[in-house]
Image (spheres, rainbow, N blue to C red):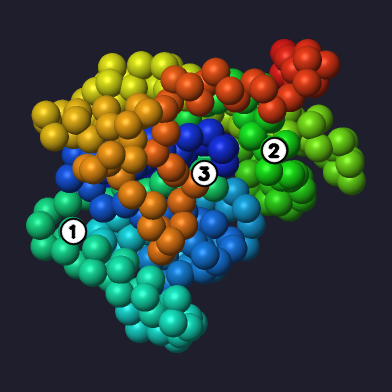
Amino acid sequence: MTPVLVTGLPRSGTSWTGKMLTASGELVYVNEPLNPQRPPGRSPGVLNARVAHRFQYICPDNDGAWLPAFTDTVALRYRFTAELRRNRSPYDLARMVRYGTAFSFGRLTGRRALLDDPFALFSAGWFAERLGCRVVILLRDPVSFVGSWQRLGWTFYFHELLEQPLLLRDHPHLEELRSLVGCQDRLAKAVALWRAARTVAVDLAARHPGILLVRYEDLASAPQHGFRRLYEWAGLTWSARAEARISRACTAAATAAGGFTWSGLSRTAYRPMDSRQALATAAGRLTAEEIHRVRELATR
C-alpha cells in the first residue's frame, strides 16, 4: 500500500494538511519521526533509527539503517521492545500504547501510513523513490513563514545542513548558507532557509513524478477544492464524511462537534482554524519595513 509523506519547512502547514488527509479514515497519522527532539522524535517504536540532525539527509548512499527502519514505519509495524529499552516514563508508556494500538489497528484494517514530517523535506526524493511515497511538499509565502517563526522566537543553525556532506553533494547551492553561520539576524536567516528549501523543493518535484508541490495559501483560501485535489493525488476516497469534516475543521465552526480535537499525546502544531482568516492575519506579525525586507531577500 502506498504511504503518504507531507513535508515542507516547519510552520508551512504540514500538520494541518496531514490531519485533513486523515479525515478520509484510510490513513494512520505518524507525527515527525525524523524530529531529533523528543517528543515527538526519539521514539524507536515508531522509527528504529538514530536521528542526528534536523533535516537529516537520507539518500541511497547512506540508507543502510534508514531503509529497514522506515520500511517498518510505513508498514505500521510498531517496535514495542525497542521503545521500552529507551523510553519508560508514564508519558512514554501512554504514547507507546497510543501509537502501538494505532499501528496495529491500522495494519489489520488495511490502512496506510501518513508521515507528517517537515524534517524530511531535503530527503523527499528518497521517500518517493525508495519507499514509494506519494509526497506533498507545502510551500508557504515567505512573509507568512518568517512572521510565524518570528512570533515563536525561532531561529535556525545552518550547521545542521552544512555538516551533512551527502546533502551538500546533492544540493550544492546550500553552500551559500555558510556565510550566515554565526549570524544573529533571525529574519535574514529565516528567509535564507526559505529560499534554500524552495530551490530544493522545486528541483525535487521536477525530477520525481511522485512529488507534488502545493502552495499553503492555495489550500487555506479554498480548502475544499485543494484537498479534493490532494485526495485524488494520494489515492484517497473523497467521501461526504471527509468533505464535512474538512469543512468543519477549516471554518470558524471548527470546534463544533465532529471536528478534530487536540490531543496532548500527538504533539502536533495543528489546531482547528478558519483557514481564510488565518491567511488575513499572517502578515500582521511583521512590520511594514520587515515585510519589505523579507520580500527583497526572498527574490534575490
Image location (x, y in percent) of residue 77: 26, 67
102 versus 214 height, above or below: below
Q: Which residue is mark 2?
A: 151
* Mark pair 3, 1: CA separation: 23 Å
Q: Choose mark 2 or mark 3, whichever is in front.
A: 2
Structural crowding at the residue carrying mark 3, measured as other residues with C-alpha within 10 Å and reported as few (<14), some (14–19) or many (≥20) = many
Cα separation, mark 2 vs mark 3, equals: 19 Å
Q: Which image quadrant: the C terminus?
A: top right
Q: Which residue is mark 1?
A: 106
Foreground residue, 133 or 217? 217
Evaluate if marks 3 and 1 touch, with contact meaning CB atoms under 8 Å apart. Answer: no
> Could you tell me which secondary element the residue under label 2 belongs to?
helix
Upstream in the sequence, badge 2 or badge 3?
Answer: 3
User: SS for tag 1?
Assistant: helix
* Viewer can see residue 209: no
**Which residue corresponds to the image point at 54% horizontal and 47% vertical from the top-left?**
119
Q: Which secondary structure lies at badge 3?
A: helix
Image quarter of residue 143? top right
| 161 to the left or right of 277 | right
Give the percent coordinates (x, y) of residue 215. Answer: 47, 21
Residue 118: assigned label: 3
Q: Point out residue 157 in the picture as x, y percentages from the top left corner.
A: 77, 48
How far, Cα to Cα, is label 1 from label 2?
37 Å
Q: Amino acid at mark 1?
A: Gly
Classify mark 2: residues with Cα within 10 Å, few (<14), some (14-19) or many (20+): few
Does the rendering let one see residue 106? yes
Q: Residues within 10 Å of mark 1 (few under 14, many from 20)?
A: many
